[in-house]
Image (cartoon, helix red, strand yellow):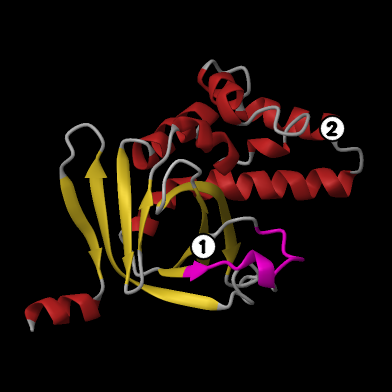
Amino acid sequence: MQTLLQIFQETKEVLCEYDYYIHTQKRILHLTNSEIKIPHLMGMQYLGKPNQFTGDFGAYAIKKQRVTMESVEKLVRKYYKTEEKQRRMLEMIHRKLDNLAELGQMFSSYSKLYLYEKEKNKESEFQSDYLLVHETGKKILHLGLVRSESGKGLYHCNSFMTTYQNDRDRDSFFRDLPYRYDITRIVKENKDTKLKEVIYQSMEAEQREQA
């Protein structure tokens, strides 16, 4: 079993060493992240007091191993009183932790980009502006993207969820979303060297280039 620190470091290599440019026919989303986003993707917001282990302190606590895989269960059992609530929280956290290793696939696979309209889905708990969905075998990976306040067209990851094909509500995160855009291309850019690489291109985009 991987440690929290190992999961954190592997996720950081994917999300923080590179920027991603997600192209659709309508727009380009520039995705950039820092390590302070990672604890939330790992489900650490469900430990302890609200958001105690997210952001700067969450990243610090994981790197210094003040919170570990062993302490996750202890914290859940301390702050959630009923056994059913503890079971559901632990299942939610482990679904994130067990599948974060597959995050890199979402930028080089045949995925779909969904636009989330908050105004039309006020009752939804899903708080992202865009949702990147990738079906991989029995799993459906969902990566939420939220607009940055620092620049137009700039986005950050703010959520990561996994459902399974045999789940009754496997499509609950995108079932009622009003718009879906096909991804035509994804470009990865190294933050240090600024070298760019096309890591995904749809068949339609390839055919247009050949033509």
Mark 1: few/some/many CA within 10 Å (<14, 14-19, 20+) = many
Q: Which residue is mark 1?
A: 131
Left of 151 or right of it: where is 41? right
The answer to whether the residue labelled 2 contacts the one labelled 1, judged by CB atoms less than 8 Å apart, is no
Let me know if residue 119 is in the magenta part: yes
**Which region of the structure is painted magenta?**
114-126
Residue at 30% over, 55% down:
21
Query: Residue 12: horizontal and vertical position, in percent?
Result: 40, 35
Quadrant position of residue 48: top right
- The three-letter code of the residue at mark 1 reads Leu
Question: Up-down: is 137 above or below 29?
Answer: below
Query: Residue 136: horizontal and vertical position, in percent?
Result: 44, 66
Left of 110 or right of it: where is 96? right
Nearer to us: label 2 or label 1: 1
- The three-letter code of the residue at mark 2 reads Tyr
Q: Which residue is mark 2?
A: 79
In the image, 150 versus 67, the foreground residue is 150
Name the mark on residue 196: none
Query: Residue 91: horizontal and vertical position, in percent?
Result: 70, 49
Query: Residue 30: horizontal and vertical position, in percent?
Result: 35, 52
* N-terminal label among 2 and 1: 2
Mark 2: few/some/many CA within 10 Å (<14, 14-19, 20+) = some
Let me know if residue 120 is in the magenta part: yes
Residue at 82% over, 33% down:
77
Mark 2 to mark 1: distance in Å? 30 Å
Secondary element under disc 1, as helix, strand or loop, is: strand
